[in-house]
Image: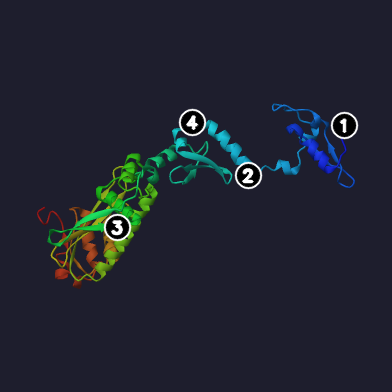
Amino acid sequence: MAPTLRSSGNAGRSLASQDGAECSAVAGSGNGNEISVDASVFQHATPTSEVATPASQAATPASQAATPTSQVTSGRVSCKRKLTSAVWQEMEPKFENGGWKAECNYCHKKFASGPRAGTTHLRSYLDSCPARHAPMGPKQQKLRLTKGEGGKVNVENIIFDQEKARKDLALMICEHEYPLSIVDHSGFRRFCSSLQPLFKMVCRNTIRNDIVAMHSAQREKMVNFFATFKHRVAITTDLWTSGYQKRGYMAVTAHYIDDSWNLKSFLMRFAYVPCPHSAEVICEALYECLVEWHLERKISTITLDNCTSNDKAMDILPDKLDTSSLMMNGQLMHMSPGSSGW
């Protein structure tokens, strides 16, 4: 057993702190003023000394509980030694809530990190980070020139609207039939960021939800419009089978002339129609579309392809409709390319 020194509390603590040596103080019995100090405290230890006494190896519960700050510091040091990707020159690894996060040095947003997460998503975000691509220097107010009356030019302030920009992006994808994955292309993200650094690019799932929501809102408006529409509407429909899916689809289009005598056409329905495509199935699918859009009493003509199933379907459809609401009691309802000379 190592020799011990008995001293008062203050003297024992001063001896234990000499020359920066490691020591272990154990509370003695009795009145609590006596301290048992290991004899190694009297040895002059060098900075590289790693000698540990048995008392120092037995850690107290307080020493076993490491603080979060020490864990983060030691983890960051070990993590930086292994980070070789170029993204870490613009990202800062941080340990939070039991996991690693990557914080952008420009906008301070945090992303999932770690060995399993990789760095591809970090590199993609840096390509479109608004703060990273924002122009340096003093900020200037954005102005827009518009044409006024008498050849004058008006100067107006521009207010950026994130929701309107997302709506225009969704309309662009629908109008030009772009793939939804265009929002994930690094070149497209970089181009949008250069035009408007404040625009926050969305992922393909978000833009898909935007398109579906816009379609639902527009469809509801058109259904309400036809509910009060007082003129006739011509219907054209076509049904085909997809070659690679072997599934049938029906498209129904409405054509009408508005109050300004302009021809308007829009797609009412693009729906899956299960096989077999018999006359009853075609008639039922077309009738459901007419009722859904409040057009069952406002039809002028219905144009279909020349085939036996379509001809039989048009023989069944008048029985589901009010023939008194049709022109000449429905005698002119069925139109086909063959009968009209197309």
Q: CA gap, disc 2 to disc 1?
A: 37 Å
Choose the circle earlier in sequence order: 2 or 1. Answer: 1
Q: CA gap, disc 2 to disc 3?
A: 68 Å
Label 3 CA crowd tier, 10 Å (few <14, some 14–19, many 20+): some
Q: Nearer the viewer, residue 79 or 180?
A: 79
Q: CA gap, disc 4 to disc 3?
A: 63 Å
In the image, taking residue 333 as reference, residue 31 lies left or right, namely right
| Residue assigned mark 1 | 3
* Furthest residue in direction right, as rendered: 30
| Residue assigned mark 3 | 281
Which SS class for mark 3? Answer: helix
Q: CA gap, disc 4 to disc 1?
A: 52 Å
Tell me if label 4 and label 2 are in contact, CB under 8 Å. Answer: no
Q: Position of residue 266 (x, y in %)?
A: 22, 58
Which SS class for mark 1? Answer: loop
Tell me if label 2 and label 1 are in contact, CB under 8 Å. Answer: no
The label on residue 68 is: 2
Dot in front, 1 or 3? 1
Residue 182 visible? no
In the image, taking residue 193 as reference, residue 226 lies left or right, namely left
Choose the circle earlier in sequence order: 1 or 3. Answer: 1
Q: Quadrant of residue 303?
A: bottom left
Choose the circle earlier in sequence order: 4 or 3. Answer: 4
Q: Quadrant of residue 231?
A: bottom left
Dot in front, 2 or 3? 2
Q: Amino acid at mark 3?
A: Val
